[in-house]
Image (cartoon, grey):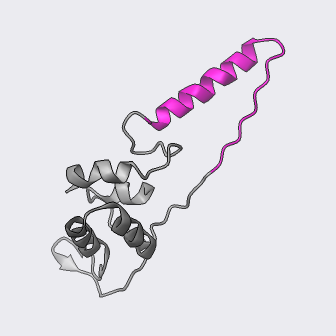
Amino acid sequence: MLSRTGPKIEQHIPLLQAAYQRNRSTTEHVFTYKSLAKKAITSNNYEFHVLLMALSKDTIYQATLIEDLKRIVEKYEFHIMKILLENIEYTEMRKSFSEPFVTNTGYPQGNSFSAVFFIL
């Protein structure tokens, strides 16, 4: 499912989003910053200004994600993704289930979609 929907979803991920992206790693961003800093330190009259911003929060809002996916993927793909996103009521640990709970934010980590859903 991820290989089928991944290319469609990738088209909607901002270019500034480097995490979990092929050919856009955060390593490249760090390397660029380090190179500019080295140039400024070793050169005369060379200035550069850096603004570091966190453009998103570390939360997945399921309702927003569901609306975004509805626009991006095919109907049958959306149906499967919606099942994975909605009605998460239990956690399982060592073959035991937690007490029931309701959530409208977040997504289970470790799933193949978790990184994709997070950056979308």
Q: Quadrant of the N terminus?
A: bottom left
Is residue 25 in the magenta section? Answer: yes
Q: Which residue occupies 40% across, 71% down? A: 67
Question: Residue 47 location, x and y as percent?
Answer: 79, 23
Seen in the image, is 78 located left or right of residue 18? Answer: left
Q: Which residues are magenta?
A: 24-53
Seen in the image, is 3 located left or right of residue 40? Answer: left
Quadrant location of residue 75? bottom left
Q: Which residue occupies 55% across, 61% down? A: 57
Total tally of numbered discs in the picture: 0
Vertical order, 27 against 36 (above or below): below
Question: Residue 73 location, x and y as percent?
Answer: 29, 61
Q: Front-most of 82 and 20?
A: 82
Q: Quadrant of the C terminus?
A: bottom left
Seen in the image, is 89 located left or right of residue 60? Answer: left
Question: Residue 82 location, x and y as percent?
Answer: 28, 73
Quadrant location of residue 22? top left
Q: Which residue occupies 58% across, 26% down? A: 32
Is residue 4 in the magenta section? Answer: no
- Among all residues in the image, which is located at the extreme left? 95
